Image (tube, rainbow, N blue to C red):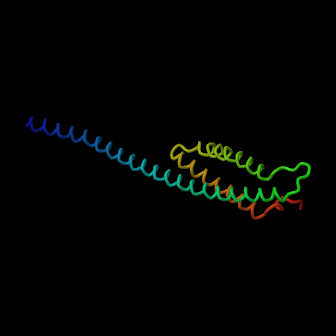
Amino acid sequence: MRKTLAVALAGLLLIGGALPAAAQYRDRDNDRVERSDRLGSITQERAELRRADAALNRAYERAIADARRSDREARRGAGWYSQEIALRNAQRAWIPLRDADCRYEVQQFRRDREAANFQCLTEQTEARTAYLREALEDGPQRYSAR
């Protein structure tokens, strides 16, 4: 009887020890899946940013070409400033501003910060693309006296 009780008790201890181990393996598997989901999300957000960046580059190149054309046609009186140079300076200033704004915005996230950063960069890049396209459509009369 004692032997049977000892064997049963040993079996319970083994099973009791195996359950937490099984739970740990399940937790690890869940962590792996969650990490894989996050990596998939980051990969997707990175691809979206590349597409938005390509669209921005196309809009920027059209805006630069338009600014050059406008510079050639413009009368160069006192206080004249090249539109091409102004646009290049604005774009060079905008890029670090976008990056800093997004770093600030995503600091509140504990998880998925990298994916949120890519999403923020994409949104701001798309907004800048829309701004450049709108500026091209409006042309020089955009800020004319009203």
Residue lying farthest to the bottom in this orientation: 137
Using the rendered view, name the quadrant where residue 52 is placed: bottom right
The residue nearer to you, when weighing 86 against 133, is 86
**In this picture, residue 143 sits left or right of residue 45:** right
Side of 29 where 104 appears, left or right: right
- In the rendered image, the quadrant that contains the C terminus is bottom right
Q: Residue at x 28, y 44 (%)?
A: 22
Query: Is 40 left or right of 22, judged from the image as shown?
Result: right
Residue 55: give x, y in percent of width and height. Answer: 62, 59
- In the rendered picture of this protein, how many numbered marks are placed on residues? 0
Where is residue 129, by image quadrant?
Answer: bottom right
Nearest the viewer among 79 and 102 is: 79
Residue 6 % position (x, y): 13, 35
Name the residue: 85% across, 57% down. Answer: 74
Q: Nearer the viewer, residue 11 or 40?
A: 40
> Residue 43 location in percent, x, y?
49, 52
128 vs 78, nearest the viewer: 78
Residue 140's place in the image compared with 102, above or below, is below
User: Quarter holding the N terminus?
Assistant: top left
Above or below, comparing residue 118 to residue 55 in the picture: above
Residue drawn at x 65%, y 58% as measured from the top left:
58
| Residue under the image location 65 percent in, 43 percent down | 100
Q: Identify the residue at the far right of this view.
A: 78
